[in-house]
């Protein structure tokens, strides 16, 4: 007798500009998953595989030679192709929730709105690399660009993206908000400009709703 296939897991992505509190809120999400006894895989982009982490290093490190916008875009998708095949698809097939710190919404926000690359080209790459795979739910951690940048500025050293100008991060935020408005059934927006004591219950409530919707 063949064993029944596990139900496909949920694909949840966490998005937002710089300094919106991703690390803190992802720790909250992980604690919630453990408390609920939900099998999960916590991963990130760019990264999540050995090759992907090398590509992440190439993307974030500041070198003398400028990185062209298209090189940046293709590196992001190279890391994603590897990550999907090696990590995300197998975990979903095992029935785990995959919590991914950034995914393709970040490409639309950073390479599309931030760098000004063609949205149609990004969409073509998305379709070629991902097929029909899209996040089931995206938590958008949102704060005004100035708030996020002042938090990110407190870090020891800024990476290649964090060194961008405020106008870049305003375009990134506007793009995220526009994508959330266009797909309200997928996105949940959490206002992270508020004190953490108000943000954490909202994150847990969003996860509770997600769990209820899948039971
Ligand atoms: P972070 O995950 O530590 O915030 O850093 C990753 C950086 O990579 C962040 O500045 C956004 C950037 N990024 C892109 O530009 N495009 C992408 O598709 C992804 C996933 C990340």
Image (tube, rainbow, N blue to C red):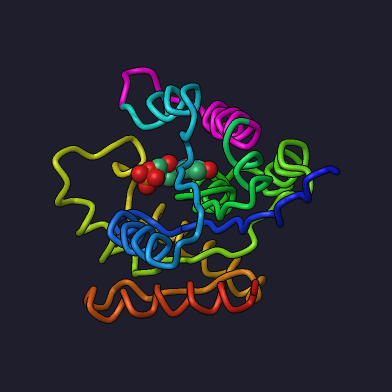
Residue drawn at (31%, 76%) of the image: 199
* Along the line of sight, the residue nearer the viewer: 104 or 213: 213
Q: Is residue 204 left or right of residue 174?
A: left
Q: Position of residue 147 (x, y in %)?
A: 26, 66
Residue drawn at (68%, 49%) of the image: 119
Does 181 sit above or below residue 63? below
* Along the line of sight, the residue nearer the viewer: 30 or 118: 30
- Secondary structure mostly seen in magenta is helix
Does 96 sit above or below residue 2? below
Q: Quadrant of residue 185?
A: bottom right
Q: Is residue 27 left or right of residue 72?
A: left
Ligand 1 placement by image quarter: top left
Q: Is residue 44 left or right of residue 199?
A: right
* Along the line of sight, the residue nearer the viewer: 71 or 1: 1
Residue drawn at (70%, 52%) of the image: 6
Is residue 20 in the magenta section? Answer: no
- Quadrant, the N terminus: top right
Q: Residue furthest right?
A: 1
Query: How many numbered marks appear?
Result: 0
Q: Position of residue 121 (x, y in %)?
A: 72, 41
Q: Quadrant of residue 62?
A: top left
Does 4 sit above or below residue 84? below
**Magenta residues, as a range?**
62-85
Is residue 67 in the magenta section? Answer: yes
Q: Is residue 41 left or right of residue 164?
A: right
Q: Position of residue 164 (x, y in %)?
A: 34, 44
Q: Residue furthest front?
A: 1
- Quadrant, the C terminus: bottom right
Q: Position of residue 134 (x, y in %)?
A: 68, 54
Residue drawn at (46%, 43%) of the image: 43
């Amino acid at each position: 007798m063949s064993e029944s296939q596990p139900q496909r897991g949920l694909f949840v992505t966490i998005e937002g500009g710089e300094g919106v509190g991703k690390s803190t809120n992802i720790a909250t999400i992980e604690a919630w998953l453990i408390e609920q006894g939900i099998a999960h895989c916590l991963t990130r982009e760019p990264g999540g595989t050995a090759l992907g982490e090398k590509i992440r290093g190439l993307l974030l490190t500041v070198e003398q030679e400028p990185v062209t916008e298209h090189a940046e875009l293709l590196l992001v998708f190279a890391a994603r192709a590897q990550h999907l095949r090696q990590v995300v698809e197998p975990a979903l097939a095992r029935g785990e929730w995959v919590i991914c710190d950034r995914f393709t919404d970040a490409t639309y926000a950073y390479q599309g709105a931030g760098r000004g690359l063609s949205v149609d080209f990004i969409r073509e790459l998305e379709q070629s690399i991902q097929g029909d795979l899209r996040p089931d739910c995206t938590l958008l951690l949102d704060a005004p660009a100035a708030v996020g940048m002042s938090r990110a500025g407190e870090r020891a050293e800024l990476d290649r993206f964090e060194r961008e100008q405020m106008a870049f991060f305003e375009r990134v935020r506007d793009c995220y908000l526009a994508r959330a408005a266009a797909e309200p059934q997928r996105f949940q927006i959490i206002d992270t400009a508020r004190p953490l004591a108000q943000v954490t219950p909202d994150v847990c409530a969003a996860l509770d709703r997600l769990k209820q919707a899948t039971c």
